[in-house]
Amino acid sequence: MEQAYSVERSRTIQTKLVLPPDTNHMQTIFGGKVLSYIDEIAALSAMKHSSSVVVTASIDSVDFLSSATVGDALSLEAYVTSTGRTSMEVYVKVYSTNLVTSVKTLTTESFLTMVAVDEDGKPKPVPKVIPQTEEETRLFKKAPLRKEHRKNRALIL
């Protein structure tokens, strides 16, 4: 019997404060800073799911929906949505919260592919994932379409 874990095992949440050095001349956070946070939390999530060291195989999509400004809190949430033999698709969403007004806004959504590796850096098998919530199930069911999109994208490069 194959090993499988619920999505909850991989769920990871972080909060970051947007500081002046993190921002551009418009006082909004640099997209590259957000990407760094996304890559970090995706790796943590994938490591929790696989109990293994992981590497980023690809950042499949990043949608910047709105910006965060100095003084906002960024809340990042990540979890494994589907798995292959050695790879894991990780979904990351980022919210900004104005700590004075308590207004919370979805700023970024992203999908990444992480690969579990052994001590020699070779890919190793990962457990399957079991979705539980409505959102997790929706993302799990659509994962084959996103995988096909990744393969098609590779054909045109």
Image (cartoon, rainbow, N blue to C red):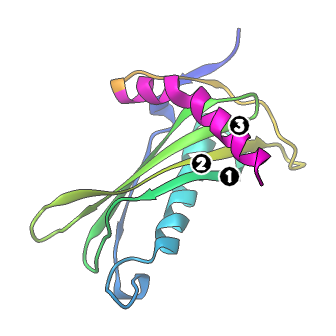
Relative height, residue 144 to residue 32 (above, below):
above
Where does the image place residue 109, in percent across and percent down from the top left? 43, 51
Separation of disc 2 and disc 1 at Cα?
6 Å
Separation of disc 3 and disc 2 at Cα?
10 Å
Q: Residue at x 66, y 18 (%)?
A: 3
Amino acid identity at mark 2: Leu
- Numbered badge on residue 58: 1
Q: Is residue 48 magenta?
A: no
Q: Which residues are magenta?
A: 135-157
Q: Is residue 145 magenta?
A: yes
Callout 3–callout 2 Cβ contact below 8 Å: no
Residue 94 appearing in the image: yes
| Left or right of residue 156: residue 24 | left
Circle 1 sits in a helix, a strand or a loop, which is it?
Answer: strand
* Magenta-drawn stretch, dominant element (helix, strand or loop): helix
Relative height, residue 44 to residue 27 (above, below):
above
Callout 2–callout 1 Cβ contact below 8 Å: yes
Residue position for label 3? 87
Please report whichever mark, 1 or 3, sits nearer to the chain's N-terminal start. Answer: 1
Separation of disc 1 and disc 3 at Cα?
11 Å
Residue position for label 2? 112
